[in-house]
Amino acid sequence: MSFWTDWKDFFFPRFCVTCGRPLLAGEKALCVSCISGLPYTGLGNTSGNEMERCFWGRFPVERATSLFFYKKDGHVAQILYGMKYKGRKKLCLQMGRLIAEELKPSGFFDGVDYLLPVPLHPLRKKRRGYNQSELLAQGISMYTHIPLCTEAVCRIHNNESQTHKSGFERWQNVSQLFRATGAAQSLSHTHVMIVDDVLTTGATLISCADALAQVEGIRISVVTLAWAK
């Protein structure tokens, strides 16, 4: 540990996002205890897993998995809230890296050509200052070296928040929400992994995948940080 690191931690202590305990050197955003205690799904790279089956009959998904289960008021909910509404950009990157560290050894990212973060509407991105799903994908990319594709799909409606909607209302809210751009044709015969922060009903991810349906030979996989099973 360097003198500079010691000095910064003394005068500007960092705290765990979930428990509030001061972080030790080498800990980032979450302490080791909280990371190990998070509700991991254990889905990994299991073909035909329960989350993957959520998309069957909706679009031909290659692979799908999520790192954590989401529970209202739980630690994962605290992480997601910080990522989306508290400007925790570094937390987004760190969670992306954690996804990659956990899943890469299983071969989950093998053969994937591009990471495609679910886009925000330009007005919402301007107001928030960033897209948490894009930063999550950047964190994955830094570990896997898979490039991002952020120009192939655009969000054409600044739809209402999904937070307090029922399952049926969520589906209505994201109907024809995305559109493929001219850049999407460059994804012909590639394997694209859509990246998002949380899976609820799957409506947003399916709408995003539908926007790419006309791209010849495209293969689509899905990864999210959390799953509200």
Image: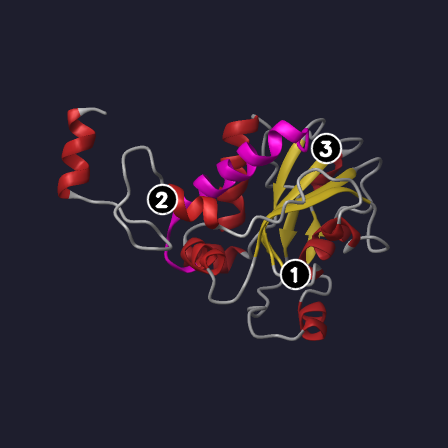
Do the residues under discs 2 and 1 have CB atoms within 8 angstroms? no
Image quadrant where one finds the C terminus: bottom right
* Whether residue 81 can be seen here: yes
Q: In the rendered image, which quarter is residue 31 located in? A: top left
Q: Main secondary structure of the magenta part?
A: helix
Instruction: Say which residue label 3 marks.
Output: 186
Q: Is residue 33 left or right of residue 209?
A: left
Please provide the residue range marked out in magenta: 85-109
Above or below for 165 versus 52: below
Mark 3 Cα shell of 10 Å, populated few (<14), some (14-19), many (≥20): few
- Label disc, if present, on residue 229 of the rendered structure: 1
- What color scheme is it? secondary structure
Amino acid type, label 3: Ser
Type of the residue with mark 2:
Cys
Give the structural element (helix, strand or loop) at label 1. Answer: loop
Could you tell which of marks 2 and 3 lies nearer the N-terminus?
2
